[in-house]
Structure formats: C-alpha cells, structure tokens
Image (cartoon, grey):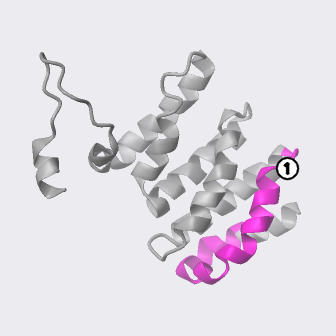
Amino acid sequence: QNGVLKALSFMFEYIGEMGKDYVYAITPLLEDALMDRDMVHRQTAATTVKHVSLGVAGLGCEDAITHLLNFVWPNIFETSPHVINSMMEAIEGMMVSIGPIHVMQYVLQGLFHPARRVRDVYWKIYNSLYIFASDALVAGYPRIEEDGVNDYRRTHLELFI
C-alpha cells in the first residue's frame, strides 16, 4: 500500500490538471489510507492529497476535495513532526483548491477550545490560513452586531455583496 500511495503522489505531482479525471477513482483509496493505523500511510496519503488538490484547483472537483478534507482533518493532532507537516501541507493545498473560507469554517470551531493543545493546533492552521489569504478571509468572518459602543460593519465589503 505504501508503494501505491507513493506512486500516486508522484504521479499527481507531475500530471497536474490531468488528474481531474482520476480524482473520484482514487478517493476511496485515499480515504482508507488516511484512516490507517500506520502513520506512514497517513503521511503518504496526505502528501498525495496535497498534490491532488493543487492539481485540480478550479476544475470542479471541490466535492471530492472537501470529502478528503474530512479525512485529513482528524489527523491534525498527530505527534510525529513528519505527519504534522504532511497534514499541514495537505490543508494548505486544500486552501488553494476549495478556498480559504471553506477551510476557515473548519478552523473556527477550535480556536477557542478549552484545551491548550487543541487551541495551539487550530491557531497554527489559522495563522497559515491568514498568511495565505488574509484578504479572502474577510468575507468569511462572522457578522457581529453593533453593541452601542462599537460599530462592526464592513461597509465596503457589504457594498460589493
């Protein structure tokens, strides 16, 4: 399984846009690898997901990439530095393919979690997201009503929406 995942990773790294035809065929294999007990399989699958998501960005495969995000996301709490790096790269690739606001919707749920270890991981992803697309995140921030003292309106953004 490790050899197949490595071959898929290298293949999708080099074929780019042509990978659009194969995304739905390899999704079950990547699902299984991302749930595997062996962390090497999860790491290689995350690298493959990164290459797939970068290759199909803007080609209409957002549903498959979102589905894979649901399998990548539970692995963000890994302890191995190599697995953590692979998962972060996979999430960053998904920021390109499905958009930063979609990824931010996953991140917002853990930014203020009571456990410090959980918060640290979520803030690391949020900081990466902020560096990648700080301008695009404005549209995804939750709307806050005026409280009498502060005015939280985004007038320029609301003009364009």
Q: Main secondary structure of the magenta part?
A: helix
- Relative placement, left or right, of 155 versus 75 is left
**Above or below, 80 relative to 44:** above
Q: Nearer the viewer, residue 154 or 71?
A: 154
Query: Which quadrant of the figure contains the N terminus?
Result: bottom right
- The residue at the point 61 percent across, 16 percent down is 115
- Residue neighbourhood size for the residue with mark 1, other residues' Cα within 10 Å, grouped as few (<14), some (14–19), many (≥20): few
Q: In this view, does 120 lie above or below 94?
A: above
Q: In which quarter of the image is residue 73?
A: top right
Badge 1 marks a residue whose secondary structure is: loop
Total count of labels: 1
- Which quadrant holds the C terminus? bottom left
Which residue lies at the image location 44% right of the left edge and 72% below the top edge? 58
On the image, numbered disc 1 is attached to which residue? 36
Amino acid under disc 1: Asp
Foreground residue among 20 and 110: 110
* Residue 92 picture location, percent across and down: 51, 51
Query: In the picture provided, is 80 more to the left or to the right than 125?
Result: right
Note whether 105 is above or below 33 in the view shown. Answer: above
In front of the other: 20 or 3: 20
Residue drawn at point x = 69 percent, y = 41 percent: 74
Where residue 46 appears, as percent x and y from the top left, is: 68, 54
| Residue drawn at 16 percent across, 49 percent down | 157
What span is in magenta? 9-38
**Would residue 92 be counted in the magenta stretch?**
no
Q: In which quarter of the image is residue 148?
A: top left
Residue 50 position, x and y percent, is 60, 59
Name the spot of residue 83 as percent of width and height, x first. 71, 42
Q: Is residue 23 magenta?
A: yes
